[in-house]
Image (cartoon, grey):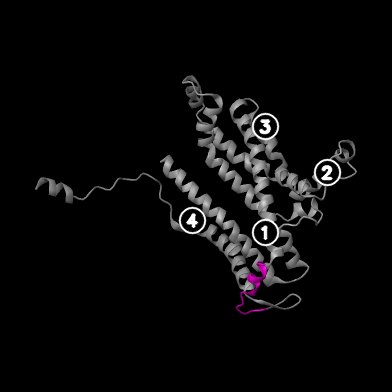
Amino acid sequence: MAAVAAAVKPTKKRRSFAPKYPAWLTLPSLLYYGIFFLGPMAILAVFSVSLQSGFGSVEYTFDTGQFAQVNDSLYISVFERTLLMAATGSLVTIAVGYPLAYWMARYLSTYKMLALLLVIVPFWTSFLIRTYALKIILDSHGYLAQDLGIDILYTKYAVGVGLVYNYLPLFILPVFASLERMDWTLIEAATDLGARPLTAFKDITLRLTLPGVVTGGLLVFIPMCGEYIIPNILGGGKFEFVGNIIGDTFGDAQNWPFGSALSISLMAALSVFVVIYIMFATREEQFGA
């Protein structure tokens, strides 16, 4: 009987000392989110199932023919090119940014904040100005082309250089934050127990900082997929991304329904990677807990 009584005895709720905030504090952010994200998304959704009745005119109806047009081989090839270039640019960014963040977090002490400041400094100037500056460096009549024979302007290689150059700080910052939280005594303990430096890095450092790497990779991959300025300036219109097609469709062709369908299709493709990231982050959080 005592065992039964103990089994049915209600358990005491654990007292929480976490601060409680009123729900109305979220209203400003929800209002901003609704006006500047959900509102434009709703407009795109309405346009995407409408029809173009003339130059810059829309007939509001329900027609999914715009999405069928997206499946044309021409636009599929642009999507493939965009995703491939964004994936390649993200991998190169990881290959360049991770060693730099590792060196800053592991070996710098006095000048660590100065190095971090130098990484952030490019963000103090306009994205457009930085891209035009890179165009001057890669110009066919410049130092690289005439003296070193490196003439890559208006090619996919110039676009790739522009992607890595402009988005590298976005990757370094979260990875540097992950490396800063590292307990480097774990590496020392592993090497004392006979682990090789590469093994200790792979099994300890890389695993502990993997969430930061994935976060940084996603932070550069998604904006690379929607890039418009870099392919336009460094590609010279010869190597277009989906963003360029969307811009031309809205601006030059004034075909808002098809431009909206392209935009929603791109967001749907990117949502797959966001879902994968959320699943990964949730698993890492449960594993860490």
Q: Residue at x 63, y 68 (%)?
A: 44
- Mark 3: give few (<14), some (14-19) or many (20+) Cα within 10 Å: some
Say whether disc 2 or disc 1 marks the residue closer to the N-terminus.
1
Say whether disc 2 or disc 4 marks the residue closer to the N-terminus.
4
Q: Residue at x 78, y 68 (%)?
A: 252
Residue placed most toward the observer, 157 or 129: 157
- Disc 3 secondary structure class: helix
Residue placed most toward the observer, 228 or 154: 154
- Mark 1: give few (<14), some (14-19) or many (20+) Cα within 10 Å: many
Q: Position of residue 88 (x, y in %)?
A: 67, 46
Give how far apart the Cα atoms at labels 2 and 3 are.
Answer: 26 Å
Give how far apart the Cα atoms at labels 2 and 4 are.
Answer: 49 Å
Q: Position of residue 210 (x, y in %)?
A: 53, 39
Say whether disc 3 or disc 1 marks the residue closer to the N-terminus.
1
Where does label 1 land, which residue? 79
Give how far apart the Cα atoms at labels 2 and 1 are.
Answer: 26 Å
Say whether disc 2 or disc 3 marks the residue closer to the N-terminus.
3
Q: Are marks 4 and 1 in contact (CB under 8 Å)?
A: no
Give how far apart the Cα atoms at labels 4 and 3 are.
Answer: 37 Å
Amino acid type, residue under disc 2 in the picture? Leu
Where does label 2 land, which residue? 138
Q: Residue at x 23, y 48 (%)?
A: 11
Hey, which quadrant is residue 58 in on the image?
bottom right
Amino acid type, residue under disc 3 in the picture? Ala
The disc placed on residue 25 is 4
Say whether disc 4 or disc 3 marks the residue closer to the N-terminus.
4
Which of label 4 and label 1 is nearer to you?
A: 1
Amino acid type, residue under disc 4 in the picture? Leu
Give the farthest residue toward the front: 73
The disc placed on residue 115 is 3
In the image, the segment drawn in magenta is 59-71
